[in-house]
Image (cartoon, rainbow, N blue to C red):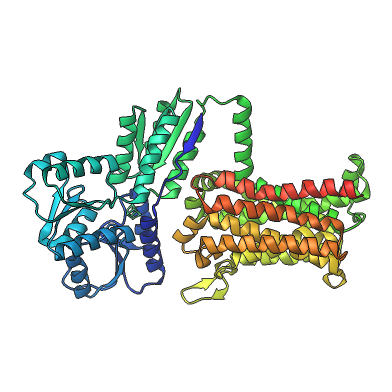
């Protein structure tokens, strides 16, 4: 079965901003943090906020203390004044597009216009806009309301931002026919518009559509209505637990869309459950390939393969392959496999890097499960279900890595030992912080840097088998280029994980600088890497193979385009694409080496 995710699905700009404000306040505000009413209409997101200590303020008390966040729907001006008077610090999360409607209502009401609002009775956004229109507001929430419409003089028509365009146009036409001369402001949010037009097109392309979102969410309900009107079967679910998988049987293409208040992690879970449904119609080969890729992703073997590819590329680039050390079991294994000493060296270097990277990444994932639950819930679940196996495999991998380093010689072993100790220290809190003791991983914006340095040392410096002071200029150049490549990789992966990191309060570069700036930084680094690799090669300062650093750099530069757009529910694809950069690098180095001799 093919699963197609709508291009516009999940948090819209306004909801995302309000959510970010609430999470920021939970980390930095003094005193209790409240949202005035439920921040969004989604139970998963609400329980997350509750877990972060953010409570819901239903009524405004005479006196209060702490911070109150006004949700994206906005409030009537009187409510805001009462919150201020009660003594709360008020953070206004009203979406800019809702503010625009409120201001249209307010300014026209002051000029003597009647404000006719087409919207859902009782919806918080509608209450807020009506509050701004004062006693000049009239609400039309159904065609029946048109009957009771009083004679209108000067008037304007506004829309609740989540109204359906066709419905709004139809009501406007009927009002204007009755009372010509009114000014119409189409204030339907573009995001809602796009989402609704897209679901119509999606329903045309697929056999059935799953709509994900809270039952109380008006825009999610509207999406389900549009699908039903199109004649396609529709299943509306709040989370993956509501999915009736048997319902999917027989459909070849299933579309998935989600309301503006549906968090990414809920969409991810629903998508992965549907994709994993075995009653699909794809070929056995496709099914097994997908399963294999998922396995590589969920076990972290994919990351280990990327590390191995990088180590092998580095070793092949650094000059003639030296003979391996003299550890008896390795020698025996090499003679059994009829490996030459140089081939054994390549195997040991690759094994050392791959096992170390696998071990450290998996240990970190096992220790630090908080963000994974939101970023990649299925991977988190897989790790949790096989925790014992993973811990044993991690310890074994680390031992294999250290033994391989020992076989490569004392410099390799000591360098790897130092990085291992740093790797363990990375997650252990030992730095006194302002709230609690912090670990190296908690230092803001440093994760990508630490990972880059660790990978570069393990995948390039340690396999060289030399003490750092005896390493020549050409190899230092390769070392820094490897570090820059890994840094770009880590930053791109941070962009995928931005929502979960935000939720658990982790300060990654993507969160500190913003996703767009971080992607610009990756483009800049990729450009610099291309220039450096070409420049150094043309100047004859490094091996001719160094020019091949341009390929993974250009690959990452190209990936920034994909990352800048739509990425919900695509952790698997996107992580695989990022790691593929290193495989591409290895292939080019192997080909380059055989062509250049
Ligand atoms: S749907 Fe549109 S108007 Fe409503 S919060 Fe989202 S971006 Fe703002």
Say how many tags the image has. Answer: 0
Q: Is residue 299 visible?
A: no
Q: Quadrant of residue 225 in the image?
A: top left
Q: Is residue 247 visible?
A: yes
Q: At 35% across and 45% down in the image, what residue appears?
A: 193
Q: Is residue 218 left or right of residue 572?
A: left
Q: Is residue 505 left or right of residue 293?
A: left
Question: Which image quarter has ligand 1?
Answer: bottom left
Q: Is residue 131 above or below residue 167?
A: below
Q: Position of residue 185 (x, y in %)?
A: 25, 53
Q: Is residue 534 left or right of residue 521?
A: right
Q: Quadrant of residue 258 in the image?
A: top left
Q: Residue furthest front?
A: 181
Q: Position of residue 290 (x, y in %)?
A: 60, 35
Q: Quadrant of residue 35 in the image?
A: bottom left
Q: Position of residue 292 (x, y in %)?
A: 63, 36
Q: Is residue 496 above or below residue 30?
A: above
Nearer to the camera, 420 or 14: 14
Nearer to the camera, 382 or 546: 546
């Amino acid at each position: 079965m093919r699963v197609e995710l709508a291009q516009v699905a999940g948090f819209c700009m306004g909801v995302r901003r309000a959510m970010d404000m609430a999470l920021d306040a939970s980390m930095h505000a003094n005193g209790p943090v409240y949202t005035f009413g439920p921040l969004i209409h989604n139970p998963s997101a609400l329980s997350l906020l509750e877990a972060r200590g953010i409570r819901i303020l239903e009524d405004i008390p005479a006196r209060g203390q702490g911070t109150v966040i006004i949700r994206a729907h906005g409030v009537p001006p009187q409510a805001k004044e009462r919150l201020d008077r009660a003594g709360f610090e008020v953070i206004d999360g009203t979406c800019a597009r809702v503010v625009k409607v409120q201001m249209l209502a307010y300014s026209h009401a002051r000029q003597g216009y009647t404000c006719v609002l087409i919207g859902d009775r009782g919806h918080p956004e509608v209450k807020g806009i009506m509050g701004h229109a004062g006693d000049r507001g009239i609400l039309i929430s159904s065609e029946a309301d048109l009957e009771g419409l009083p004679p209108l003089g000067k008037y304007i028509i506004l829309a609740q931002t989540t109204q359906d365009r066709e419905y709004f146009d139809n009501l406007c036409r009927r009002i204007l026919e009755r009372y010509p001369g009114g000014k119409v402001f189409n204030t339907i949010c573009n995001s809602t518009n796009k989402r609704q037009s897209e679901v119509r097109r999606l329903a045309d392309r697929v056999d059935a559509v799953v709509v994900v979102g809270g039952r109380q969410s008006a825009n999610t309900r509207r999406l389900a209505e549009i699908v039903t009107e199109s004649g396609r079967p529709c299943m509306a679910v709040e989370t993956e637990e509501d999915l009736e998988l048997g319902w999917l049987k027989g459909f070849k293409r299933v579309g998935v869309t989600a309301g503006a208040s549906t968090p990414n992690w809920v969409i991810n879970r629903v998508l992965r459950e549907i994709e994993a449904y075995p009653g699909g119609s794809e070929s056995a080969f496709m099914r097994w390939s997908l399963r294999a890729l998922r396995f590589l992703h969920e076990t972290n073997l994919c990351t280990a393969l990327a590390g191995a590819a990088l180590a092998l590329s580095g070793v092949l680039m650094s000059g003639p392959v030296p003979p391996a050390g003299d550890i008896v079991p390795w020698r025996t294994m090499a003679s059994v496999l009829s490996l030459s000493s140089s081939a054994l060296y390549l195997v040991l270097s690759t094994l050392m890097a791959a096992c170390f990277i696998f071990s450290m990444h998996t240990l970190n994932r096992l220790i630090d499960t908080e963000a994974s639950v939101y970023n990649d819930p299925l991977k988190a679940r897989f790790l949790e279900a096989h925790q014992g196996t993973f811990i044993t495999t991690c310890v074994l991998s680390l031992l294999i890595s250290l033994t391989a380093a020992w076989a490569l010689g004392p410099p390799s072993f000591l360098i790897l030992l130092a990085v291992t100790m740093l790797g363990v220290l990375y997650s252990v809190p030992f730095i006194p912080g302002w709230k609690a003791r912090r670990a190296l991983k908690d230092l803001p914006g440093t994760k990508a840097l630490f990972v880059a340095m660790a990978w570069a040392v393990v995948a390039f410096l340690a396999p060289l088998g030399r003490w750092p002071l005896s390493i020549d200029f050409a190899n230092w150049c390769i070392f820094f280029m490897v570090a820059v490549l890994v840094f770009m990789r880590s930053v791109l992966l941070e962009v995928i994980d931005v929502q979960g990191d935000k939720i658990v309060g982790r300060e990654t570069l993507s969160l500190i600088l913003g996703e767009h700036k971080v992607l610009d930084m990756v483009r800049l680094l990729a450009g610099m890497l291309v220039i450096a690799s070409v420049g150094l090669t043309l100047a004859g300062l490094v091996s001719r193979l160094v020019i091949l650093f341009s390929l993974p750099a250009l690959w990452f530069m190209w990936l920034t385009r994909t990352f800048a757009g739509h990425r919900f529910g695509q952790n698997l694809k996107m992580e695989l694409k990022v790691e593929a950069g290193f495989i591409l690098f290895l292939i080019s180095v192997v080909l380059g080496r055989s062509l250049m001799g």
